[in-house]
Amino acid sequence: MIFMENVTFSYGKSEICSGLSINIPTGEIFGLVGASGSGKTTIMRLLIGSIKPHYGNIEILGKQPSPSLCKNIGYMPQSQALYEDLTVHHNIDFFARMFGLGEPFHRRQVVERILDNLSLWNQRNTLVDKLSGGQRQRVSLAIALVHSPQVLILDEPTVGLDPRLRASLWNHFYSLAKEGVTIIVSTHVMEDASRCGQVGFLHLGRIIASGSPRELMTRADNSSNLENAFLYLLQEGETK
């Protein structure tokens, strides 16, 4: 479903990704875990086609990233792209129309369901510039979901959310995965990483280890948590 092979990308002389390979099957939740500056956002941009690799191959749904794939991909960027002078409902409705949900009755049903699923119903008539950071995060996620994409690419989706809402969103992600939606989540929060089916530890644009959370902890000298596993495997890689 999501395939990257030997991908290299640089900004000028700064190499961001080097020989990066990822293979994510249909219905998987894959966590791309790394510190700030490790290349997570660049990988997300490569996947949606807003930038092109200098070397290597990228395929989503069997095709190279392009504007024609947008109808099948939901993307939530780390920097929110919202119209602050519009209400929550009007923001989501606008993007629903942009994604081709033209029939008014069906579009209204879709938008109302998304508002309810993401606990935004009470804020539906509130201007975006009046929302908290966490509420804005949910509006961005609603926009990424409104066209029922087959692939969901989420850049730090739970930043600023309280634990209860974070748990609610993860339950929603699990439901989507059961329906066959493939999800890639970038995060530096190990609590989020532990909820993923598969995890790739990213350091300086390279995957230093990948596997299920349990597999990674076992590999890292039976570490008690993912944070310790990441530090162990990072040190192991630096000493090789």
Image (cartoon, rainbow, N blue to C red):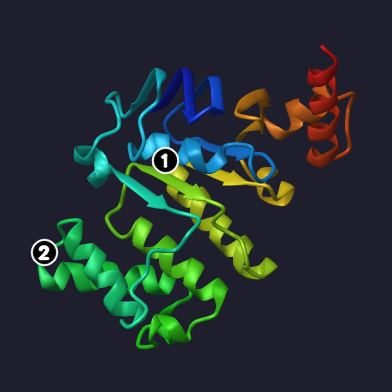
The residue labelled by disc 2 is: 102
Residue ID at (18%, 60%): 98
> Residue lying furthest front in this view?
13
Secondary structure at badge 1 equals helix
> What separation in Å lies between label 1 and label 2 (alpha carbons)?
28 Å
- Viewer-nearest residue: 200 or 46: 46
- Viewer-nearest residue: 25 or 32: 32
In the picture provided, is 154 more to the left or to the right than 224?
Answer: left
Residue ID at (27%, 25%): 63
The residue labelled by disc 1 is: 45
Secondary structure at badge 2 equals loop
- Viewer-nearest residue: 51 or 22: 51
**The residue under label 2 is which amino acid type?**
Gly
Label located before the other in sequence (1 or 2): 1
Residue 169, position as x, y percentages in the image = 54, 60
Inspect this view and state whether residue 118 appears.
Answer: no
Inspect this view and state whether residue 198 appears.
Answer: yes
Residue 213, position as x, y percentages in the image = 71, 34
Residue 227, position as x, y percentages in the image = 81, 41
